[in-house]
Structure formats: C-alpha cells, structure tokens
Amino acid sequence: MSDLVIETTGLRKEFRTRRGGLRVAVQSLDLAVPAGGVHGFLGPNGSGKTTTIRMLLGLARATKGSMRLFGTEVPRGLPGVIDQVGAVVESPKFSPNFTGRQNLQLLARTRGIDRDRIDHALATVSLTGRDRDRYKSYSLGMKQRLAIAATLLKDPALLILDEPTNGLDPAGIREIRDTVRDLGEAGVTVLLSSHILAEVQQVCSSVTIIGNGRMLASGKVDDLLGASNVYRVRVSDHEHAVRRLEEAGFTVEPDHGVMRVETDRPPADITRILGESQLWLEELTAVRPDLETVFLELTSGEALGEGVKQ
C-alpha cells in the first residue's frame, strides 16, 4: 500500500469556453501528499486548486490522468475510502436558527454517526462554550470552524480544506490557522488549499505550488525556501564594519542602520573578521525568502491566460 494519502499522475481537466475554445484548468499535474501533517496546496485564484479538489472528491470528471486516495484509484474506488475523507469545499449549509450543537446533532443523526463524536469535534475546533449559540449569531470564523467540526464527526484520516480563510478577518484567520495546526499535530493529514502564502507558511510542513494549472514546485517548505546566503548584520560602528567586510571580500548593502551581507562563506567568518577589528555583533540573522517570494519567482515567467486554447 502506498504511503501517500493523495497521489495524482498526469492529471488534466479541460473545459469548453462559451466561444467554443478549450480551457485547460489543470494540466499534467503530479500531486503527492504524504501521510501526516499539513500540506499546502498553493496558487493564485483560478490556478486550478479547486478543480483538482473537486476531481479528487468525484465532483468533477478528469479529462486525463489518474488519481488515488489512500492507494485506492478514484473516482472508481471512492465509495470504499470516502468515510476516511472530510472536506470543506463550498459554503456549509446549516440551519441558521439551530445552535451549533443542534446542527451537528442533526448531521450525526442523518449520517448514522455516534453522537459522542459531537463533543470531541466541538472541542477540536474550540467551539465548546459557544455550541449552544444559534448559528446565525456566529462570526464567519466560527461558521467555518463549525464546518470543519462537521467533517470531523466521522473521524477522517484526511481533511481537505479549500480556501478556508476566504473573507475572514485577522482574528478568524488566526482561529482557522490554530485549528489546522492542531489537527496536523494530532495525526490528521490536512490538504490546505490557499492563495494566502504567508499565512500557509505558518502551518504547513510541505507544499505544492501551482500556477495556470501546472505544478511549479513541490516539497518540504524548508527545502523550497533554501539555505540563506544573505545575513542581516548590526554593529555599533556601522561605517567601520562596512569597510572591513568589503575589504574581506563580502558584498555589503547598507539597510537603514543595519547591513545586508551576501556571501557563500559561513556566517562564522563574519563574526571572526569583525571581532578581529574589535567590532562586536549586536545582531547576525540569516535572511530567508518566504513562500510569497518563492512563488513570485516561480510565476514570474507565467503568462496570464496561458491555460486557454482557441
């Protein structure tokens, strides 16, 4: 059995446009999501994330390629694995006049799920204490967390979240981020689709970045960010330090009272050279790119509308 929870090979999805042309929403996508932790599925709006998720869940038909969930080919084998999958893909449909708990009770009854799961699901998304408030009084963040709680009733091994922070204020985004992080740490595999790269970086251990329906990069976050060869350096005698480092062959760029030092040499060389001149470090910090920077570099050559063929 494969150790990959999600696996796609050569996945492709085509749509006919109103003008009779062909739009390729997903093209030759090889997606591999290992078991455990949070895997970011990243890309701008319209990049093919939601289309891919809908194909995995049997909500859209692939034009070409293969898909597997827990090693089982889907959509053919989807009935055999669907109970292991929870997903929040569209706006949840809850009764506004029911409390959060009542909505989950109704859902558990219609699906034949043990009601003992309700307390656990509510606690997991931190809605205990607000579960007897009416759904219509919930903030957007609370509504989204209740939607996640609904998927947790069947204790899924895989949770797929499609843009769960859309429309949320900073407090709501933080609530969802904390919930997703806790689920990943508890052993649930989470596929988190988003275009908010800086937010996702805080919770994901691995990511796949797509653009115009194509995979641009995939792997562990630390590997994609790469090792830094730029350092932020601060000393009391700024001008003397700049001169001494440049004499030693470093590339130095002053930056508002600090220095950005670029070098392939180990940072210990910076410490040693400055120390030999009685210049003592107040700060030496590696400057690493974030996911947004990496993404912009990856997509700089991507032409908008490249997925449309007439």
Image (tube, rainbow, N blue to C red):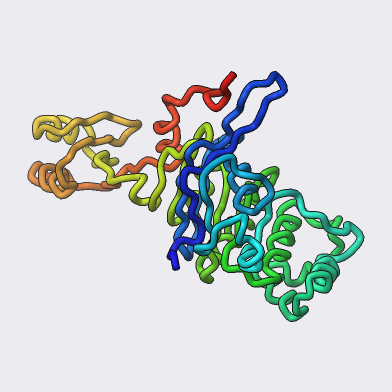
The answer to which quarter of the image holds residue 277 is top left
Residue at left 76%, top 49%? 91
Residue at left 33%, top 49%? 223
Vertical comparison of 26 with 21: above or below: below
Left or right for 129, reference 60:
right
Q: Position of residue 62 (x, y in %)?
A: 60, 43
- The residue lying toward the viewer, choosing from 221 and 277, is 221
Report the number of discs. Answer: 0
* Residue 132 in view in this figure: no
Residue at left 56%, top 42%? 196
Q: Quadrant of the C terminus?
A: top right
Vertical comparison of 262 with 172: above or below: above
Residue at left 91%, top 60%? 97
* Residue 279 in view in this figure: yes
- The residue lying toward the viewer, choosing from 29 and 178, is 29
Q: Quadrant of the N terminus?
A: bottom left
Q: Position of residue 161 (x, y in %)?
A: 62, 53
The answer to which quarter of the image holds residue 77 is bottom right
